[in-house]
Amino acid sequence: MSRRFLLPLALLLAARSAAGCPCSDEAGSAGGLVREDERYAVALSTSTRSALGRFDAFGHYSPLGAREGELGEELLLRAGLRLPRRWEWIGELGYSAYRFHAPSFVESQNGLGDALLRLRYSAIDEGMPHESFPRPALLLSGLLRAPLGTAADGGTVNFGSGGAPRGLGAWELGAGAELKRSLWPALEVWLGGEAAYRFRDHAIGTERRLGPRFEAAVGARALPVDWLAATLALRVRTIGDVELDGRTLAGTSERLTTLVLGLSVYERGRRLRSALTFSIDPPSNDWSKGATAAGALGLSLGVGMP
């Protein structure tokens, strides 16, 4: 890992206490950043993602060659505001570094990614245990992406739909919903989805429109002891075919399936929060298509303020 990420990693590894919901975005859920008893929160996360192989347009998987490598690293800053209580506003901005090498080719890039604004609204609270119908909580969300980063060219900055985000080169507008329900005091499950539209752009010198994006995730969070939370999730992300100069390019759609495991120290009495997340795109035929399978490790450290 490059030196510019060592200091944040050291800080993240040193964090020992956490507060707030550990079922965050890094664990596959559409979870938020600011607890209901807080007004503000900030978080810094770092992730390293290493490619394993590639899926073709038909879902056939091929591992990387012995002399090939593809690595992405990202630092992501998130800041959140809860105003009023049921409304949560989250801004995100990342800096990423990318390297690809093959026997006759080497590419290295780094720079800012796109800026994202997320809005989450707690529409319905979870029903009480004594009620006859186990009503889940309902959360609605919105997303606006501003293209500040550099769009990938030549298809080399790939990683599929879940890679280090150097930039789409296009504005994106999305909306989603999530259902959450506590089955027992120490177990919570959720089901969520998001759809996003990408507007036309000229990021590669010609008129382009990226295909729409759809995501779905199902997961569970358990607290085996009173200070540790574990999250397991399955996420599927699909992107439609690309359109260039009014012509749809068949076979350019993507589907990426990801398994996510998250661990977080969970202590309500403190404002600090930390989490460790591991994810993998199963490197097997038919799990994904038109994407790059990779394994990723992420660490995050945050703090909330009343």
Image (spheres, helix red, strand yellow):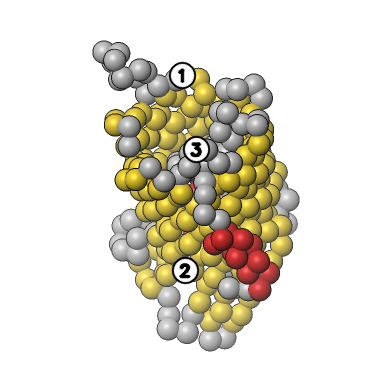
SS under mark 1: strand
Q: CA distance from mark 1 to mark 2?
A: 40 Å
Q: Residues within 10 Å of mark 1 (few under 14, many from 20)?
A: some
- Which residue is drawn at the image coordinates 59% and 82% (left, top)? 105
Disc 3 marks a residue whose amino acid type is Arg
Q: Is residue 283 visible?
A: yes
Q: Residue furthest front?
A: 269
For mark 2, what is the residue?
Answer: 51
Choose between 18 and 4: the one closer to the eye. Answer: 18
Choose between 85 and 123: the one closer to the eye. Answer: 85
For mark 3, what is the residue?
Answer: 268
| Residue 177 position (above or below residue 238) | above
Disc 1 marks a residue whose amino acid type is Ile
- Which residue is drawn at the image coordinates 52% and 49% (left, top)? 17
Question: x and y percent of residue 31 in the render?
Answer: 50, 38
Choose between 275 and 90: the one closer to the eye. Answer: 275
Q: Residues within 10 Å of mark 3 (few under 14, many from 20)?
A: some
- Which residue is drawn at the image coordinates 38% and 73% (left, top)? 63
Question: x and y percent of residue 250 in the render?
Answer: 47, 52
SS under mark 2: strand
Instruction: Specify the label residue 124 is tagged with.
Output: 1
Q: Is residue 59 visible?
A: no
Q: Residue furthest left?
A: 132
Q: Mark 1 or mark 2: which is in front?
A: 1
Q: Assign the N terminus to one quadrant of the image.
A: bottom right
Task: Please tell me which of labels 1 and 2 falls first in the chain.
Answer: 2
SS under mark 3: loop
